[in-house]
Image (tube, rainbow, N blue to C red):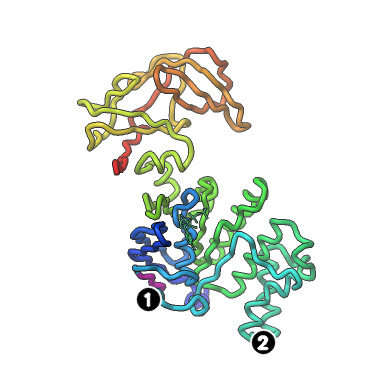
């Protein structure tokens, strides 16, 4: 990479104490986040948690009530959208129906009065990168959903923004295409080394695409970390359940572990609370014929669902149903031993607001 390319690489974003209220609705309550240059950062959360509002504030399409945003060390909180080195790809793509694909992508450069040769070069490069060269002369209605999605991306990327904001850009695609575009997006981001900020409520999408994920709930960031961090060590029940399936077990601390509806479970380390919750992902539970040395639970298979790659099993060891995952079929009615190994049990720090 030469010096010139280096100087155009994305600058970090610092989002500090952002609050936003719409009438009675508190959309954002003191959100602070640092996004590193060239990072693929995802805002993940259920509908209404404030992720789009935060994205719009970063884009300059909405003003925060309080708090500040810095880009590359510069305060951009009051900078109009047009002056920010930020481009947004919206859910709806918002392509111009009467313009060809080439002209849709060229639009931003034309309005900034780039010379024709430079427009041809830049648009051509982006169309090629996104495998759209053969479609340059078509109009949006002649493209599939996935192709339109890629045009929207090309149109945003042609402006070479420091930060690309993606507002649920894959929500209109079917499952197979969605998986494809997620991989493409990840690859593209790695290649361009720009900062991407994705908004989604799809945990699988967040896990696939991101360097780091901020899990949001009711206008706050509940947890922020790498996909492995948030999946393996969820902070509370909300994060544990939002990022995939989790067995939540109410527990009371006793010497060496916790007392639960299944009896004593050894734990390492000890929880800081007296009563709380421990969690374990279905796929982390061992299933066997013999009693494990620690944390064994005798259980009966009550339900089985075939998933293609594995079977989901529900077992009834007593008052709580446990969900596990198995590569082989185990018929309902069979009794097995479950192993909830101490290192697989996560101690949750639920907010008791
Ligand atoms: P979704 O996934 O459904 O798009 P979201 O997490 O992006 O949800 P936001 O769109 O940021 O959530 O909305 C956060 C809260 O603020 C919601 O309760 C929403 O109803 C409210 N809200 C957002 N925009 C406005 C507005 N312009 N006027 C009034 N309330 C708004």
Element type where label 1 sits in the image: strand
Tag nearer the camera, 1 or 2: 1
Q: In the picture, which quadrant includes the C terminus?
A: top left
* Above or below, comparing residue 21 to residue 5 in the picture: above
Residue 350 position in % (x across, y down):
32, 40
Classified by dominant secondary structure, the portion drawn in magenta counts as strand
Q: Nearer the viewer, residue 80 or 108?
A: 80
Q: Is residue 329 left or right of residue 323?
A: right
| Residue found 57% across the figure and 16% down from its top | 331
* Above or below, comparing residue 313 to residue 140 in the picture: above
Around disc 2, counting alpha carbons within 10 Å, would you say few (fewer than 14), some (14 to 19), or many (20 or more)? few
Circle count:
2
Around disc 1, counting alpha carbons within 10 Å, would you say few (fewer than 14), some (14 to 19), or many (20 or more)? few
Q: Does 70 appear in magenta?
A: yes
* Above or below, comparing residue 181 to residue 126 in the picture: above
Quadrant in the picture for residue 299: top left
Looking at the rendering, the stretch of residues picked out in magenta corresponds to 68-73
The answer to which of marks 1 and 2 sits earlier in the sequence is: 1
Q: Does 137 appear in magenta?
A: no
| Residue found 23% across the figure and 29% down from its top | 253
Element type where label 2 sits in the image: loop
Residue 104 position in % (x across, y down):
70, 72
Real-space CA distance between mark 1 and mark 2, rounded to the nearest whole angstrom: 31 Å
Q: Which residue is mark 1?
A: 75
Q: Which residue is mark 2?
A: 115
């Amino acid at each position: 990479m030469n010096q010139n390319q280096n100087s155009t690489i994305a600058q970090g974003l610092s989002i500090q104490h952002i609050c936003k209220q719409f009438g009675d609705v508190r959309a954002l309550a003191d959100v602070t986040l640092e996004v590193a240059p060239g990072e693929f950062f995802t805002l993940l959360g259920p509908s209404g948690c404030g992720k789009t509002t935060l994205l719009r504030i970063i884009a300059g399409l909405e003003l925060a009530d309080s708090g500040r945003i810095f880009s590359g060390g510069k305060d951009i909180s009051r900078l109009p959208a047009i002056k920010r080195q930020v481009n947004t790809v919206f859910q709806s793509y918002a392509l111009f129906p009467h313009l060809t694909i080439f002209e849709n992508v060229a639009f931003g450069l034309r309005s900034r009065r780039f010379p024709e040769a430079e427009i041809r070069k830049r648009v051509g490069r982006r169309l090629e990168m996104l495998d759209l060269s053969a479609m340059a002369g078509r109009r949006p209605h002649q493209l599939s959903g996935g192709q339109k999605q890629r045009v929207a991306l090309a149109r945003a990327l042609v402006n070479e923004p420091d930060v690309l904001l993606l507002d649920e850009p894959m929500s209109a695609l079917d499952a197979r295409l969605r998986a494809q575009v997620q991989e493409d997006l990840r690859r593209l981001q790695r290649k361009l080394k720009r900062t991407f900020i994705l908004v989604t409520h799809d945990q699988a999408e967040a896990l696939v695409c991101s360097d780091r994920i901020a899990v949001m709930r009711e206008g706050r960031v509940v947890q922020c970390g790498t996909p492995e961090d948030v999946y393996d060590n969820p902070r509370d029940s909300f994060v544990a359940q939002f990022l995939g399936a989790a067995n939540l077990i109410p527990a009371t601390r006793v010497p060496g572990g916790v007392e639960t509806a299944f009896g004593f479970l050894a734990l390492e380390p000890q929880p800081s609370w007296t009563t709380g919750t421990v969690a374990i992902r279905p796929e982390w539970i061992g299933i066997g014929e013999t009693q494990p040395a620690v944390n064994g639970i005798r259980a009966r298979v009550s339900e089985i669902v075939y998933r293609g790659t594995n079977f989901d099993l529900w077992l009834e060891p007593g008052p709580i149903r446990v969900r596990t995952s198995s590569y082989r079929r185990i018929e309902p009615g069979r009794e097995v031993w479950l192993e909830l190994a101490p290192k697989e049990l996560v101690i949750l720090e639920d907010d008791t607001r």
